[in-house]
Image (tube, grey):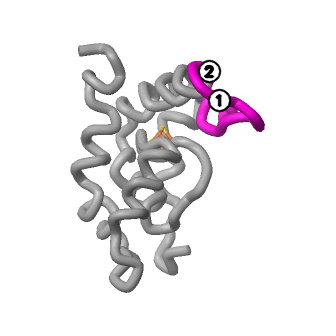
Amino acid sequence: MPSDVRWFWQDHGACRETDPLLFFHPQNERGSARAKRDRAAKIVCAGCTVRLECADYAVRAREPYGVWGGLSEDEREQIYARLDSRHYPRAQGEGARVAAREIAEAVSPRVLGIA
Ligand code: SF4
């Protein structure tokens, strides 16, 4: 876990008023049910003012579960797979920088089906 983690941004997350179960899949959830729940969570993230801070944290902490900063578990796994473990981002802001393309794409209107 990043050593500089400060959770101030969570106080401003749009998900504070949302059921946490929207962001974390129940056991054995698969297929269209999972895609539908992930999409609903991403729509909340798309309007969140601390999305970049959230995504930055999730990438650096290698969060295994849930939608963070609009990134699903699978999307983060793809980011982890392409990053060099020897130079893995640790400093605050580095996660957002190295995954900027994926973070932007994750909540694009095209991906969310609202284009
Ligand atoms: S980006 Fe999404 S998961 Fe992160 S704080 Fe905002 S609403 Fe919550």
Q: Which residue is mark 2?
A: 33
Q: Look at the image and tell me whether residue 100 can be seen.
A: yes
Image position of 51 with respect to 77: above or below: above
Give the quadrant of the N terminus. bottom right
Q: Look at the image and tell me whether residue 54 can be seen.
A: no
Image position of 7 with respect to 67: above or below: below
- Percent of width and height locating residue 70: 42, 39
Q: Which residue is mark 1?
A: 30
Asked if the residue at tag 2 contacts the one at tag 1, i.e. Cβ–Cβ closer than 8 Å, the answer is: yes
Image position of 49 with respect to 89: above or below: above
- The foreground one among 22 and 105 is 105
The residue stretch that appears in magenta: 18-33
Q: Which mark is residue 80?
A: none
Q: Residue at x 69, y 32 (%)?
A: 21
Asked which secondary structure carries label 1, the reply is loop
- The foreground one among 101 and 17 is 101
